[in-house]
């Protein structure tokens, strides 16, 4: 893991797997780069004492830090991730536990939104700008330690200054270590915490929820900084702790004492979900696995007695034949799950979040709802497609089979499923489009629908995890995408084997200048040999302006802010 420095030790065989023991070593020189290969070396660093240094040296065990532990340090301004190389070896990705000054976090959020500030009221935008400027000024006037504290406090204050619109659901805080921080996921948006927010749906979890994962931390270190989380305004919590405790020899008794305090304090503020500790790779020392087994046994028995719900993260990742983290979900270091592993974690966490609140059927529940531009919203007036819908010209590959199908699962509150079945004999790209809808530039709209997919070729998870296969968005009169309306693709959660439900889509956006008409596009992109059946229902393009709701539906961002 990138929080410690290791070398290969003696050969070790566990079951049928042969590898080498990892041996922690200290006093190792670590250089930081801008890319995994090539790139530029960052040499303008500050060590934990605020001294300018070109490289960082792992602890040798002579101080309070354990041998091999990489001490805290500050990278260049505006840099939120680096690639670390120990003694010139292979590089490992490291992510900042704050994410840079708050201005940098806001830029990151704006990039996801597509149009910076488009989803905010003027007052909200000004409040965030003022908070960001104050944070930057405060950070520039203090030393490295105070700078981190000021950035965290400003991030909490600025997040709280978002418009109080659309307060449905709870604001969740995700507390943990480097796994919660998103380490080894291919992108911050693919971390388990970010994806759990999307999978749970905005009716149950607010998008201004945040992650507070600090790489390398044990449970006692999380307890030491819990006051910042308590002051954040979060009302619900996910706690994932124990990976570093196991690696540093923390006893089950000590772990239990710390977790009892964390759960008790958070339960005073709201609901608490506690994840079982993820499994480690087969090559890790037996003592690590033994400790994790003990921690998880305690969590399963005692966390519910403290009022917390246990989420079996360990069970979502483990190879049940070995009790270890399998290669399919391992980033390669035996500790951090890869992107697919983070997805597995997100699905069990999202399921627990959904179970903690009432289900939301979606916005559209009848035809002719005020503000809805879609005339056949329930998909029950056409023949094989909703009335007026058509396939956009210039599609390629295998033609789809369209049909309108009665819902047998009880998910649709009304109407039928608009079904698109594609058994791709060749690479295929097809778009199902709504009729053109006259609109007024400057109006605020919301795209909403329910969606499912049947995986008939057995590869949906891997395909959707790579952000391909399908998308829903809104285009203007020329067929150009309206950036702020484009949705984030999701794998969905499995209801029965081979069927995946997407979270209810509810996505507000503002029509850019020059827009005179709009179409909803449901896009499908398949490789040869893939076979999926897509289902869409309860479709709406809601004019929030005509309903007087233009300032009352504001998600701020579809990406969680890092607030470690």
Image: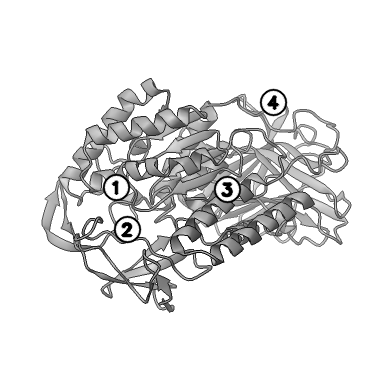
Q: CA distance from mark 2 to mark 1?
A: 10 Å
Residue under the image location 77 percent in, 60 percent down: 479
The nearer-to-camera label among 4 and 3 is: 3
Dot placed on the residue nearer the N-terminal end, 1 or 3: 3
* Count of number-bearing discs: 4
Dot placed on the residue nearer the N-terminal end, 2 or 4: 2
The nearer-to-camera label among 2 and 4 is: 2
Q: CA distance from mark 4 to mark 3?
A: 38 Å
Residue under the image location 53 percent in, 68 percent down: 78
In the rendered image, the residue lying farthest to the top is 305
Residue on which the image places disc 2: 3
Residue on which the image places disc 1: 244
392 over 301 or under it: above or below: below
Work out whether residue 529 can be spotted.
no
Q: CA distance from mark 1 to mark 3?
A: 26 Å
Residue on which the image places disc 4: 413
Mark 3 neighbour density, 10 Å: few (under 14) some (14–19) many (20 or more): many
Q: Position of residue 439 (x, y in %)?
A: 87, 50
Q: CA distance from mark 4 to mark 1?
A: 46 Å
């Amino acid at each position: 893991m990138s929080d410690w420095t290791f070398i290969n030790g003696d050969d070790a065989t566990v079951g049928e797997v042969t590898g080498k023991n990892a041996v922690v070593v200290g006093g190792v020189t670590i250089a930081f780069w801008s890319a995994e290969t090539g790139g530029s070396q960052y040499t303008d660093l500050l060590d934990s004492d605020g001294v300018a240094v070109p490289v960082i040296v792992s602890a040798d065990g002579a101080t309070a830090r354990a041998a091999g532990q990489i001490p805290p340090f500050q990278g260049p301004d505006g840099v939120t991730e680096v690639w670390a190389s120990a003694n010139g070896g292979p590089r490992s990705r490291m992510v900042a536990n704050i994410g840079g000054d708050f201005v940098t976090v806001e830029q990151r959020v704006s990039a996801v939104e597509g149009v910076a500030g488009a989803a905010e009221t003027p007052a909200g935008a000004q409040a965030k700008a003022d908070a960001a400027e104050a944070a930057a000024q405060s950070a520039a006037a203090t030393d490295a330690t105070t700078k981190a504290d000021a950035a965290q406090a400003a991030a909490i204050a600025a997040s709280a200054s978002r418009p109080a619109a659309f307060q449905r659901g709870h604001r969740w805080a995700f507390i943990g270590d480097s796994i919660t921080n998103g380490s080894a996921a291919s992108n911050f948006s693919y971390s388990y915490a970010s994806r759990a927010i999307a999978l749970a749906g905005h009716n149950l979890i607010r998008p201004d929820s945040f992650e507070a994962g600090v790489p390398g931390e044990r449970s006692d270190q999380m307890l030491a900084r819990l006051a910042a989380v308590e002051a954040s305004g979060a009302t619900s919590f996910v706690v994932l702790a124990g990976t570093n405790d196991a690696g540093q020899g923390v006893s089950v008794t000590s772990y239990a004492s710390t977790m009892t305090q964390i759960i008790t304090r958070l339960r005073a503020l709201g609901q608490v979900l506690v994840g079982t500790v993820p499994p480690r790779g087969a090559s890790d020392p037996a003592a690590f696995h033994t400790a994790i087994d003990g921690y998880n046994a305690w969590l399963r028995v005692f966390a519910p007695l403290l009022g917390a719900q246990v989420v079996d993260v360990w069970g979502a990742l483990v190879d049940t034949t070995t009790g270890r983290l399998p290669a399919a979900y391992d980033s390669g270091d035996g500790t951090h799950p890869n992107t697919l592993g983070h997805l597995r974690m997100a699905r069990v966490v999202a399921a627990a979040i959904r179970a903690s609140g009432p289900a939301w059927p979606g916005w559209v529940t009848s035809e002719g709802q005020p503000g809805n531009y879609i005339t056949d919203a329930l998909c029950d007036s056409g023949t094989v497609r909703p009335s007026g819908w058509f396939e956009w010209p210039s599609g390629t590959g295998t033609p789809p089979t369209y049909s309108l199908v009665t819902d047998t699962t009880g998910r649709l509150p009304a109407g039928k499923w608009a079904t698109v079945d594609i058994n791709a004999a060749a690479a295929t790209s097809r778009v199902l489009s709504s009729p053109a809808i006259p609109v007024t530039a400057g109006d605020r709209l919301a795209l909403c629908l329910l969606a499912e997919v049947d995986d008939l070729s057995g590869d949906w998870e891997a395909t959707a995890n790579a952000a391909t296969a399908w998308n829903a968005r809104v285009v203007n009169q020329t067929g150009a995408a309206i950036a702020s309306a484009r949705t984030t693709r999701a794998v969905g959660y499995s209801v029965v084997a081979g069927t995946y439900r997407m979270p209810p889509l509810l996505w507000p956006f503002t029509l850019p200048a020059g827009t005179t008409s709009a179409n909803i596009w449901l896009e499908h992109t398949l490789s040869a040999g893939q076979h999926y059946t897509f289902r869409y229902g309860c479709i709406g393009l809601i004019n929030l302006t005509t309903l007087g709701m233009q300032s009352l539906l504001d998600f701020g961002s579809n990406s969680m802010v890092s607030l470690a």
